[in-house]
Structure formats: C-alpha cells, structure tokens
Amino acid sequence: MNSSMNRLDVHDYLTSQIVSNEVEFLSETLGNLRDSGEISNDAYLEAGNIQGGLSLIASLIEQKVSDEEIRMQFEQLSDRAIRICTMYPDMDGKIEQYRN
C-alpha cells in the first residue's frame, strides 16, 4: 500500500488516468492475493479502503476539484496506508511482486 501511494506521490501532476491505472492494478492484485490465500480477507478489506480512496481521488481530479482538496485527500489516504502496512507488514511486498 505504501508503495502504491509513493508511486503516485512522485508525480508532479496527477491525472485521473494515472490514479485509475493504480486502482485497476490494486483491484486485480488484491483479488489474486486473497484468492491464493496469500492475504487474509481482513487484509483484503482493509486494502480495499485504499483502492476506494484512490477511486475517489481519480473522480475528484476529473471533476477539477482544487489541488488543495485533492492533496488533503491524498495525505489522509497515505496515512491510512501506513496504518494498514503496520497491521499487515508483508502485504506491501506481496502487492509489489505483481507489478511488472
């Protein structure tokens, strides 16, 4: 989860497509990890909060909401990702194994 947030944070200018691509990647990867038993259903649901939050951010970008509001949402989501990674320390590495 931290890696996903960090990947998005390095962009000087986020587009809804960049964020949506990460949402798609997380959706597929988290489903695969849950189905294979590599992460628990609880971990899957927690991580789904990040995926949903990123979907919200993509929508805010499309709606041309202020950069300040988007940044605030992104920072709150990043904090949540840190908490999830603390609860499930191996999840981030498992997610990143699926990245090409």
Image (spheres, rainbow, N blue to C red):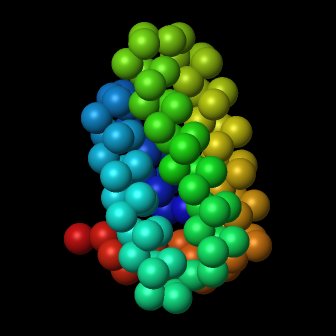
Residue 10: image location, x then y, percent:
42, 44
Left/right placement of residue 79 relative to residue 90 reads right
Residue 60: image location, x then y, percent:
48, 21
Query: At x 52% / y 32%, what residue is drawn?
Result: 56
Nearest to the observer: residue 3 or residue 55: 55
Image quarter hosting the C terminus: bottom left
Residue 61: image location, x then y, percent:
42, 21
In the rendered image, the vertical position of residue 61 relative to residue 93, given as above or below? above
In the rendered image, the vertical position of residue 53 relative to residue 64, given as above or below? below
Left/right placement of residue 24 relative to residue 75 reads left
Query: At x 65% / y 56%, what residue is drawn?
Result: 81
Image quarter hosting the N terminus: bottom right
Residue 92, image quadrant: bottom right
Query: At x 45% / y 81%, what residue is drawn?
Result: 35
Nearest to the observer: residue 95 or residue 6: 95
Residue 17, image quadrant: top left
Name the outermost residue toward the left: 100
Q: Is residue 65 visible?
A: yes
Left/right placement of residue 5 relative to residue 81 reads left
Q: How many marks?
A: 0
Query: At x 43% / y 31%, what residue is drawn?
Result: 58
Left/right placement of residue 17 relative to residue 36 reads left
Q: Is residue 2 visible?
A: no
Residue 70: image location, x then y, percent:
56, 24
